Image (cartoon, grey):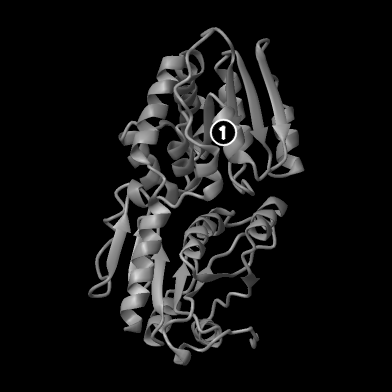
Amino acid sequence: MTVHFDSGPSAAQGSARELRIGLRADASPGVGGGHVMRCLALSEELRRRGAEVFLLGRAAGPAWLRTQLDDQGLPVLPGPDDPEELVAVAREMSLDAVVLDSHTLDPECSGALRAAGIVVAALVDGNARAQEADLYVDQSPGGHDIGTGLPEGALRLGGYRHALIRGAVLAAGRRPDRPVVDSSAPAHVLCFFGATDPYGGAPVAVRALLATGAPLRLTVVAADPELARAIEALPPGPAQRVQVIEPVGQLPELARAADLVVTAAGSSVLDLLCMGCAVAVVTVTASQQPVYEAVVGDGLVAGLGSVEGLRAGGAALDDGVARLRPLLTRPAERAGLARRGSAAVDGQGCSRVARTLVDLIGGRRR
């Protein structure tokens, strides 16, 4: 594959030029949009620090994600999967560093980039997956422990302090403690499962919410028309109202207005904790289990189990319903979750990660 880029000024022209950083990540119905979204968060801070930043990968959809990329003005260029091709692209673009955010990318890509003298940062989730990096960032709870066999001298940043929170989330602000005016009023619940919801989590979660029998106003984000139809086919109770909407880019604003958010145990949970939302989580893949166990164990969210367990019904569904019912009927319980979550995630993770990456590049240049 031959791809030509406007590579800008050569590194040979001196170290005074702007830093040039590539973010290698993809969004698709299979992998969702989480990798690209947290790269967007990091890119905002890197650009504030004067770096030129490029997304290298595939991000054709969904439409709202493309809008996010366009609004930020982040160039999207082809991101090869082959190690030699990725190095060729990085060299042609005169990149100082490449940030890798992928669970499926060939781990030889990272080693090839480092061998070419390019700083490599890897965004990982509890497992380095054989990526060879100068900097590992694991924003999941307990993220300092990402295994052995890492390169000598590699830096590791992890845990809640390094959660990559987008500017839109920070702009939405932290929810103030709201006085309970009428504890009998139906709870307003937001339910969403990512940009594509490949595992069909939204209908499963809605079924559990309705099974509580508690009064509620439910807003559900349906990733596609088939999921929307499945949700609309579920009969609500007499004091339950359900509104189904298409994916939107204004989820932070929707979440801030909700009393409870039900979602997958992915990276968006950290956004919600930073905002001070009360959150209940479901695992949709085995890779989410470590994050799920940590945030539930730390008392920051309510755990509802796995999407497959809830879908199967029986005791797993009964347990999930039992955990949801007090959250829907007891404002004080929701408020406790919200306070603990916002105390754990302060929203400054992008600044800490960007500063470390820029310092690494600076050390390499000297």
Q: Alpha-carbon neighbours of circle 1 within 10 Å: few (<14), some, or many (≥20)? A: many
Image check: 283 left or right of 140? right
Q: Which residue corresponds to the image point at 34% horizontal and 65% vertical from the top-left? A: 356
Q: Mark 1 sits on what residue? A: 255
Badge count: 1
Image check: 354 left or right of 258? left
Q: Which residue corresponds to the image point at 55% horizontal and 7% vertical from the top-left? A: 184
Amino acid type at mark 1: Ala
Q: In the image, residue 278 lies at what x, y percent?
A: 46, 28
Q: In which quarter of the image is the C terminus?
A: bottom left
Residue in the foreground of this view, choosing between 233 and 186: 186
Q: Which residue corresponds to the image point at 69% horizontal and 55% vertical from the top-left? A: 67
Q: In the image, residue 69 lies at what x, y percent?
A: 64, 59
In which quadrant of the rendered view does residue 148 lie?
bottom left
Above or below, 175 relative to 164: above
In which quadrant of the rendered view does residue 60 lie?
bottom right
Element assignment for label 1: helix
Q: In the image, residue 12 lies at what x, y percent?
A: 45, 92
Residue in the foreground of this view, choosing between 208 and 173: 173
The reply to whether residue 191 is visible in this rendering is no
The reply to whether residue 207 is visible in this rendering is yes
Q: In the image, residue 236 lies at what x, y percent?
A: 68, 18
Above or below, 329 relative to 25: above
Residue in the foreground of this view, choosing between 256 and 325: 256
Residue in the foreground of this view, choosing between 356 and 318: 356
Q: In which quarter of the image is the N terminus?
A: bottom right
Above or below, 289 relative to 263: below
Above or below, 34 relative to 205: below
